[in-house]
Image (cartoon, rainbow, N blue to C red):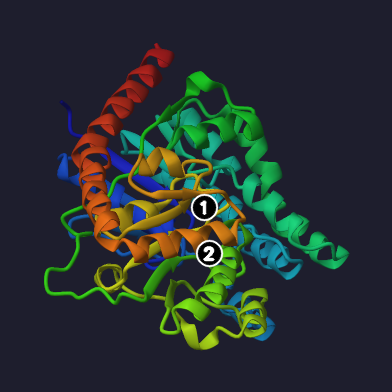
Amino acid sequence: MQKLNIAILSYRSAKFGGGQGVYIKDISMALTFMGHKVDVISGPPYPDLHEGIDLIKLPGLNLFETFSFKDRVNKFFNKKNKSINDYYEFISVLFGGFPEMKTFGYRANIFLKKNNHYDLVIDNQSLSYGVIDIQNRLPLIEIIHHPITFDFRYELKTSKRIKYKISRYRWYSFLRMQKKVAPNINRIICPSNSSKKGIIEDFKCKSKNITVINNGLDSSEFKPMIDSTRNPFRLITTASADVPLKGLDYTLIALKKLKTRYPKIHLIIIGTIKKNGHTKRLIDNLGIEQNITFRSNISKAEIIELYSTSSVAIVSSLYEGFGYPVIEAMSCEVPLIATNTASIPELTGKYACLVKPKNDEAIFKSIIKILSDYDKYKEIAIKGRQHVINKFNWAKITKEYENIIYETIKEFKDADI
């Protein structure tokens, strides 16, 4: 088949910033291995890419690198040749908004007008107005991991304070744009049937325009370390603290209950904790600060080491469009407890202990059950790794991507005839 020039757009792609950075690195690598020429066009923070993949930087103001008003003002005034997008970005952030998707879309559109040699453009969930203009000129695929409307709804439920709710409405104001753009996208890829259902319901997209292709995982990289020893009282979870959708509260409450039975119990949280935030206050109130370690900005190798030395992995999310921590833990052969919601049962199959969301008691009992009969659940975890290898390998997934890519290009060309 014809080898293509592909541009992948990503409004932000932090190396250690969760699923988006992982996805950009992996999909660009997979398409490159298939022989295509891939450029990643990204706003800051920038991704860590494999050798042979060009990174084209579209710098915005990167105002979320700091939360200091003074630093943000300095960033704005120190930028030379400011555009109207820079002014909009600064003012929007000043009033509590998140404008990066919108301004990146405009910048990407301007760039692609001047650099129109690409056969296909893949946009990673900006759903910005600029993407519609790009779609009019070039074959385009939009990646929607899940509708951010879910995040918005869960955050509104966490507090009754009017000031907080107003701040959330302001922050998520970009959803007005995404709800307008999404129904006008001709080709969408999402990673799970749960995500597809949400996209249809919340973004009013047509089912025929959406293709489900799972995200992939490099199981040759995510595998148990041979020389590692599992700490029998170490638990591990991946959760952005103070993000209600991740359901971390319920794992923390379960940990409090476990302390009585297992005084040495310890939880590794791959994520950051916000100073004086909700999670910090909860940890202090529960008296479990000595039983918790937060790890952030760590490499894949360090994450794999943590999985390989932990005895139980927990994913207590209230919603996941596609839960990377689920398949990462399974690929590292860690017995897994996960919530029975959204895409998670699609990912785990029968190889995890599934519990109801928002149920700390179920997490507590499941941990006891696993630690009390560890050999049994270790065997299940070993089979779970093979499940991940079979279902989420990049060779299979990239072929599915290629089929949609060539189909999208053909439809675009036929529409021009």
Outermost residue on the left side: it is: 226
The answer to whether 142 appears left or right of 103 in the picture is: left
Residue 132 left/right relative to 265: right
Above or below, comparing residue 15 to residue 204 in the picture = below
Q: Is residue 113 visible?
A: no
Name the kind of residue labelled 1 in the image: Arg
Q: Where is residue 131 in the image (x, y as percent from the top left)?
A: 52, 39
Residue at 65 percent across and 77 percent down: it is 282
Q: Along the line of sight, which residue is nearer the eye, 254 or 226? A: 254
| The N terminus lies in quadrant | top left
Left or right of residue 251, residue 372 in this image: left
Crowdedness of circle 1 by 10 Å Cα count: few (<14), some, many (20+)? some
Which badge, 1 or 2, comes first in the chain's sequence? 2
Q: Which amino acid does label 2 sit on?
A: Gly
The answer to whether residue 298 is above or below residue 284 is above
Write the residue at 37% across / 56% down: 336
Q: Identify residue for label 2.
A: 60
Residue 155 found in image quarter:
bottom right
Q: Is residue 274 visible?
A: yes
Query: How much space separates mark 1 and mark 2, taking CA atoms?
Result: 9 Å
Q: Nearer the viewer, residue 73 or 293?
A: 293
Tell me if label 1 and label 2 are in contact, CB under 8 Å: yes
Expressed as whole percent of the image width and height from the top left, the position of residue 202 reads 65, 35
- Residue 357 or 395: which is nearer the viewer? 357
**Residue 113: horizontal and vertical position, in percent?**
44, 42
Q: Mark 1 points at which residue?
A: 107
Q: Residue furthest top?
A: 417
For residue 376, which quarter of the picture?
A: bottom left
